[in-house]
Image (spheres, rainbow, N blue to C red):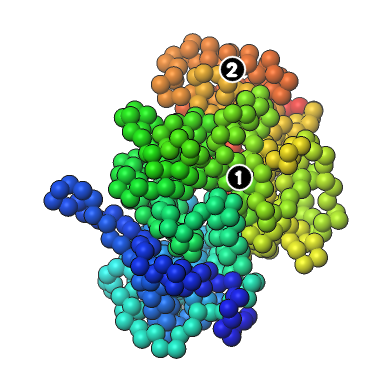
Amino acid sequence: MATAASTNSKNVGHLLAQVAAERGDAVAIATPGRRGADGRRTYQTITFAQLEADSTRLAAGLAEMGVTPGTRLALLVKPSIDFVSLVFALFKVGAVSVLIDPGMGRKNLLRCLDQVEPEGFVAISIVQAVRVLMGRRYKTAKKNVTVGRRWFWGGPTIEDLRKTDVGSFQTFAAADDDPAAIIFTTGSTGPPKGVLFRHEGFYEQVQQIRDRYDIQPGEIDLPGFPLFGLFNSAMGVTSVIPEMDASRPAAVNPLNIIEPIHDWQISQSFASPAVWNKVGLYCEQHDIRLPTLKRVLSAGAPVPPHVLRRMKNVIHPDGDIHTPYGATEALPIASIAASEVLDGTELQSQQGAGTCVGRRFSGIEWRVIRITDTPIETLDQCESVADGEIGELIVTGPVVTRRYFTSEEATKLAKIADGERIWHRMGDVGYLDGEDRFWFCGRKAHRVQTLQGDMYTIPCEAIANNHDSIYRSALVGVGEPGMQIPVMIVEPWGDKYPQSRAAIDELLDEVKALCAAHPLTESIRDFLLHPAFPVDIRHNAKIFREKLAVWAEERLDLPTQD
Ligand SMILES: Nc1ncnc2c1ncn2[C@@H]1O[C@H](COP(=O)(O)OP(=O)(O)OP(=O)(O)O)[C@@H](O)[C@H]1O
C-alpha cells in the first residue's frame, strides 16, 4: 500500500480537493427541507469548500478512532449531505466502505454483512440499535459511528467526529490497486455478491462518465442513485438529492423529482428506469414539461422504449436520454441514446434482435465468446464467436473489477486472466453487430437449454410483448438443462387484465398465435398468464425468472422428454 503523499494517487478524495480549490463557493449538495411560509420548498446546502473541509474533519476523526487504510466499515446512511461527506471521509482515511442496498431485503442484507465482517458501522441510529441487539453476531465491529442520536450504545456520533482537530491529517495516497469499497450486486441470478472496488476503478468511473457525456463543472444533477452524489462532487457538479427511498425507486412520488428540477433548473438526472417510468407518466397526465433537463441517464436495467418516448417528450427539445449498460462488477461498459433506440433499434428489438445497449466506452475492450458455464482460467482458453453470433460478453478495462470479496468460487467463474489484465464475464449473452454495438439477449443463467439448442430470453419475449395487452413476458425452462421445455409466461397491462377464464384463454391463444408465427418462438407450446411478476426491488425491472420457472413447473403437467 502507498503511504507517502503523492499527487498522482487515484483516490477520488483528491478530486474533491481539486474541485474545492477551483469552485469552493458553489453549492456541492442540496437536500430538500421544510416548506417556507410561501409554500416553496427550502433546501439545506453545503458548498464544495465546506464539503472538502467537513469530509477531512470526519476522516481525521475516523483516524483518531483507529481507522487505518484497509479497515472495513459498513456505511448504512440515507442519501444526504452526511452520506456524501462520509463516503469522501472513508476514501480519505483509506477505509474500505461496505455499501449495501437495503432494497435487497433484510435476510440478504444480514447475509452480506456476515460475509464481510465489518470492523465497524457508520450508520443511522436504528441500524446501530439492531447491531447492538444482535449481540455477538457483530462482535468484530468495534469502530462504530452513529449518524443521528445515540441511544444505548457507545462510540462517537458524527457530530463528535466533526469536532476533531484536523492537525496533520493527510488524505491516503492510495495506490491504484488499494481496495476502496465492497459493493453488492442486485442478486437477480442468486444471492448478491460482494464486489471489491479498487481506488483506480472509482477514479476511472468518474473520468469515463464525464468524458462520454461531456459533463461540465457547474452543471446541476438530481441523483436518484446515492453514489452519483459522490461522482458529481468529484466532477464539480451540484447534486440536488431528491426525497425518495433510493432502494424502492418505483415508489417515488414524481412530484419529489419534478419540483426540485424546476426549483434548481436542473440540467441532468441519473436514476433508475422505474423512476423515469413514474415521472414520464405523471408529466404526460398533468401536461408538465421539464425543459431545463438536457441529459437524463437511466441505468441498472433495461429501459422500455415507452418510457424513453414519454421522457423524451417532456425534456428539453435537444435533450436526450442515455442508457448506460454495465454491472456492479464493471460499469460503465456501453451506452445508447434514446434517439438511436426510437429511430432505429427498437424496430429490430421488436422482431427479436435483442436490446441494443450501444457502443463501448473508450476505456473498454470487449469480446463475445462461446457460452460455457465452467471457469475459464486464461484468455487463450476462450473461443471468440463471429459478429452477429450469440455468445457471452467479456470485458476488460480500468473500471472492470478484479475479484469478489466474498467468494473465491464466484471469482473463478467470472474472471479470466490475461497477463496483468483481468477480463470479467458479464454473465450476459448477446452479440456484436457490424458497428461494434452490443445487442443484449438476456442473462446466461436464464437461457433455456432445449434438446434443439439454446433459446434466449430477451429476443423470444419481445415477440410475445408485441401483443397490445401484454406488459412484459418471461421465457423460462422447465426440466433438466439440455432437455428443458420452454414456457412463455405473460403479464398483461393492469387495465387489460382478462376478467374471466374464457378471456384468459382467448388472450393466451392470441399470444400463442403470435409466437407460432415467428421462427424464434414457434417451438413454444406452453403459455401461462401471471398477474404480477416477481422482480427485484432495486430496479423493479429484473424479472426473477428462476422463481417463475418453479411456479410454471407447478402449474404445467408436462411430459418428460426422453
Ligand atoms: N442498459 C441495460 N440494458 C439491459 N440490461 C442491463 C442494462 N444495464 C444493466 N443491465 C443488466 O443488469 C446486470 C447487472 O446488474 P447488477 O450488477 O445490479 O446485478 P445483477 O446481475 O442483477 O445481480 P446478480 O449478478 O447478483 O445476479 C447486467 O449484467 C445486465 O444483465
Residue lying furthest left: 37
**Residue 147 position within the rendered picture, expressed as x and y whole percent measured from the top left:** 33, 69
Helix, strand or loop for disc 2 = helix
Q: Is residue 487 visible?
A: no
Queried on whether the Cβ of the residue with tag 2 lies below 8 angstroms from ligand 1, the answer reads no
**Residue 473 position within the rendered picture, expressed as x and y whole percent measured from the top left:** 56, 28
Q: Residue at x 52, y 76 (%)?
A: 94
Q: Amino acid at mark 1?
A: Ser
**Residue 70 position within the rendered picture, expressed as x and y whole percent measured from the top left:** 56, 77
**If the image is split into quadrants, where does the C terminus sit?**
top right
**Would residue 371 appear left or right of 21 to someone viewing this image?**
right
Q: Amino acid at mark 2?
A: Val
Q: Is residue 281 visible?
A: yes
Q: Quadrant of residue 175 in the image?
A: bottom right
Query: How many marks are shown on the rendered structure?
Result: 2
**Would residue 416 appear left or right of 12 to someone viewing this image?**
right
Badge 1: residue crowd in 10 Å (few <14, some 14–19, many ≥20): many
561 or 175: nearer the viewer: 175
The numbered dot on residue 386 is none
Q: Residue at x 58, y 13 (%)?
A: 509
Residue lying furthest bottom: 168
Query: For mark 1, what is the residue?
Result: 335
